[in-house]
Image: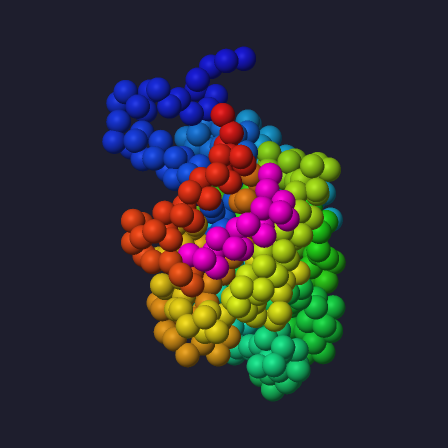
Amino acid sequence: MSDTFYGSDFDALESFDPEIAGVLVSELDRLRGGLQLIASENMSSPAVLTSLGSTLSNKYAEGYPGRRYYGGCSEVDKAETLAIDRAKALFGADHANVQPHSGASANQAVYGAFMKPGETLLAMSLPHGGHLTHGSKVSFSGKWFNAVHYGVDKETENIDYAEVERLAKEHRPKVILAGGSAIPRLIDFEFFRRVADEVGAIFWVDAAHFIGLVAGKAIPSPVPHADVVSFTTHKVLRGPRSGAIVCTEEHRAAIDKAVFPMMQGGPQMHTIAAKATNFKECATPEYQTYAAQVVANAKVLAETLAEKGIRPTTGGTDTHLSLHDLQPVDVTGADAEARCDAAGITLNKNAIPFDPQKPSVASGIRVGTPCVTTQGMGEDEMRTIGGLIARAVVEGDADPDHPVSKAVRAEVTDLVTRFPAYAR
Ligand code: DSN
């Protein structure tokens, strides 16, 4: 079965283009050499990466399986059909479209399916945990649609459900959207469904962040409640960098037409094959154990940071991520990110609700456990990591030669040596 052209051929790249080969090597070294705590990242399997580096990348296949605008699609049709069938089974969905190139492309297609320019969307505000594509003024979604935003309650820091209902009744939106990129708590999908029904709106869930936890049965699914669920495939889900949409039978045609030909051209068949493999991985008991561990780890990491004075918004997390307010330790998000980076810990600064700082500085950090859990780390290691983050943030420096950066980095090295990424 061995033929280098089934998958990637590193030797060929290295001999022709040593500069780019060097980037591949040093990026793998970077992944292996530090702690990856960006909540939206993960480490997909060698099986998934193999399809991404395959000859399926060459094929034009505009259309859908059995209905293409190009010849020669017999093999890629098999890959897409497998991906569709596996996504439907994994999420219990009537229909799946696996062609979106990314989360933003998937979201664009949902707009295309349900909204005309100028119509009203009700979604979570970006500074309170939403997403650029949920009607931010700098995104197509905020430029083309009338976006009305709900936020979080000042006391609980959780979604202000009373505000959702009030705004829905006041603005009668065409679409109500739940989901975002910095929401640590479970979302009450039944509530959104009821409100959407009361005002005659489409109920859309952008599940990009937490769909992997749904696939692993670690948290409740939005699929039985929503008209349409868009998501990325590379976060907790651990697939290739891409997107997908599942929806009810009623919306199948609208979604398919919106993905192609309205928003996209040729689908990326290598990525679709990788999504099929990823959906198969997610249906295994091992993946369910992983998803549960991601949540258990996130809870312990949030608790440990809280004990060190780095306050989790909403008091903790139910998911794979927590959002922390650094004002009690008098450090900005930007400084915390730089100090952690110098100590071998990759995480991101993040606005917290009602943040007095501008987004490029921010008062918070967001931490997530998908990567470290993939590496096999558990709750004990999360206590260690919480202590290391706190030390780097409170006592550390952006200079990698600072004694605290060096001391924390030594402990990071010990951890990643015991729990290697992409173990050899
Ligand atoms: N950039 C992603 C995240 O980090 O959450 C969302 O698009």
Magenta segment, prevailing SS (helix, strand or loop): helix
Foreground residue among 386 and 59: 386
Visible in this render: residue 392? yes
Residues in magenta, as a range: 376-392
407 lies above or below 126: above
Q: Residue at x 39, y 39 (%)?
A: 30
Q: Position of residue 411 (x, y in %)?
A: 46, 44
Q: Quadrant of residue 332?
A: bottom left
Q: Residue at x 63, y 56 (%)?
A: 300
Q: Is residue 156 magenta?
A: no
351 lies above or below 92: below
Q: Position of residue 318 (x, y in %)?
A: 66, 60
Foreground residue among 12 and 365: 365
Count of numbered labels shown in the rendering: 0
Q: Position of residue 237 (x, y in %)?
A: 59, 45
Q: Is residue 386 magenta?
A: yes
**Direction from residue 255 to residue 338 in the image, left or right:** left
